[in-house]
Image: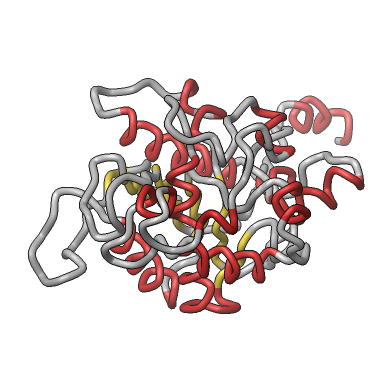
């Protein structure tokens, strides 16, 4: 009887069930142009779920009233995330801008190696979340006190060195993330104030996010946008789409635990605790 059963057993494929960590995935391509309340084509939000590939999410209303807008504003995205992550499904959010600065910035300005205190300090000198504020107002000394918290374009975070990205201080060049980073950081602070312990900022709150929490992480679309063809949309739309699709695909395949724990030496991990890391780098 056993001999008869063996050929049957050899033909049975082993099935491994993977339990996804999240239910929803938001890919956000960012822009540091204009003011926080300006609606910009460079700001794109795509949403995917376990059952659905990414689709574009349009703003439901402007920051000043119920009038529907074609494009998002930075303030609009921050308020959208604050609402959606308050009690919504477990969500992984990937945003395309730097979440911190290189270690030499902390050392030059005698700042504690504490990301949350860094956000508070930065917003005092670069209040780019104010409705009327543009990055260049602060860079040119018209507003804020940016000259007291400047960086060097030669400084790059360890993650930027590894993937070939430009410095968060490298302004006015093609492919620069300097403006988007300088305008995005105060909104990370806003989300932390609004959501507190409901939201896990990776890796600053820990490299292994606890189950049940929504997570927000820095992403770099160039790591994944070659994997998915552009079907006639703008580069900003395509980047947001690719971020959401890659995160969904990684979670469904059971790869997020490995992605959340990149293989880094102890000194590199300690540096990344301060500078942050890019989701999916060093796979």
In this view of the protein, which residue sits in the foreground, 228 or 10? 228
Query: Whole-percent x and y of residue 128?
Result: 40, 60
Question: In the figure, 210 relative to 55: above or below?
Answer: below
Task: Identify the residue at image location x=33%, y=48%.
Answer: 45
Residue 257 visible in the snapshot: no
Question: In the figure, 181 relative to 194: above or below?
Answer: above
Extreme right residue here? 266
Q: Quadrant of the N terminus?
A: top right
In this view of the protein, which residue sits in the foreground, 278 or 116? 116
Query: Whole-percent x and y of residue 237?
Result: 31, 36
Extreme front residue here? 141
Q: Quadrant of the C terminus?
A: top right
In this view of the protein, which residue sits in the foreground, 71 or 186? 186
Q: Quadrant of residue 215?
A: bottom right
Task: Identify the residue at image location x=42%, y=25%.
Answer: 174
Q: Is residue 54 left or right of residue 119?
A: left
Extreme left residue here? 67
Question: In the figure, 89 relative to 101: above or below?
Answer: below
Residue 229 visible in the snapshot: yes
Q: Is residue 72 left or right of residue 151?
A: left
Query: Whole-percent x and y of residue 112?
Result: 77, 66
Task: Identify the residue at image location x=59%, y=41%.
Answer: 250
Instruction: Name the colouring of the figure.
Output: secondary structure
Query: Whole-percent x and y of residue 253?
Result: 61, 40
Number of numbered callouts drawn: 0
In this view of the protein, which residue sits in the foreground, 192 or 116? 116
Q: Is residue 185 left or right of residue 60?
A: right
Task: Identify the residue at image location x=17%, y=64%.
Answer: 62
């Amino acid at each position: 009887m056993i001999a008869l059963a063996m050929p049957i057993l050899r033909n049975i494929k082993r099935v491994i069930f993977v339990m996804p960590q999240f239910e929803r995935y938001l890919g956000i391509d960012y822009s540091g142009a204009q003011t926080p309340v300006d609606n910009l084509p460079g700001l794109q939000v795509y949403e995917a779920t376990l059952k659905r590939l990414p689709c574009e999410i349009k703003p439901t209303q402007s920051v000043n009233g119920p009038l529907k807008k074609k494009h998002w504003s930075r303030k609009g995205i921050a308020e959208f995330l604050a609402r959606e992550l308050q009690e919504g499904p477990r969500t992984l959010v990937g945003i395309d801008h730097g979440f911190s600065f290189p270690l030499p910035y902390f050392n030059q300005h005698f700042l504690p190696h504490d990301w949350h205190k860094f956000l508070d300090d930065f917003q005092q000198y670069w209040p780019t979340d104010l409705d009327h504020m543009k990055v260049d107002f602060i860079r040119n000394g018209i507003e804020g006190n940016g000259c007291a918290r400047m960086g060097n374009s030669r400084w790059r975070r360890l993650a930027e060195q590894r993937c070939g990205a430009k410095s968060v201080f490298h302004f006015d060049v093609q492919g620069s993330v300097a403006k988007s980073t300088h305008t995005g950081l105060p909104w990370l602070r806003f989300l932390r104030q609004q959501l507190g312990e409901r939201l896990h900022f990776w890796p600053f709150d820990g490299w292994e996010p606890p189950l049940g929490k929504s997570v927000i992480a820095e992403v770099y679309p160039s790591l994944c946008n070659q994997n998915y063809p552009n079907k006639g949309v703008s580069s900003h739309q395509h980047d947001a789409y690719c971020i959401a699709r890659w995160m969904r695909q990684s979670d469904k395949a059971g790869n997020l635990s490995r992605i959340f724990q990149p293989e880094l030496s102890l000194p590199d991990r300690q540096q990344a605790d301060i500078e942050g890391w890019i989701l999916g780098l060093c796979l």
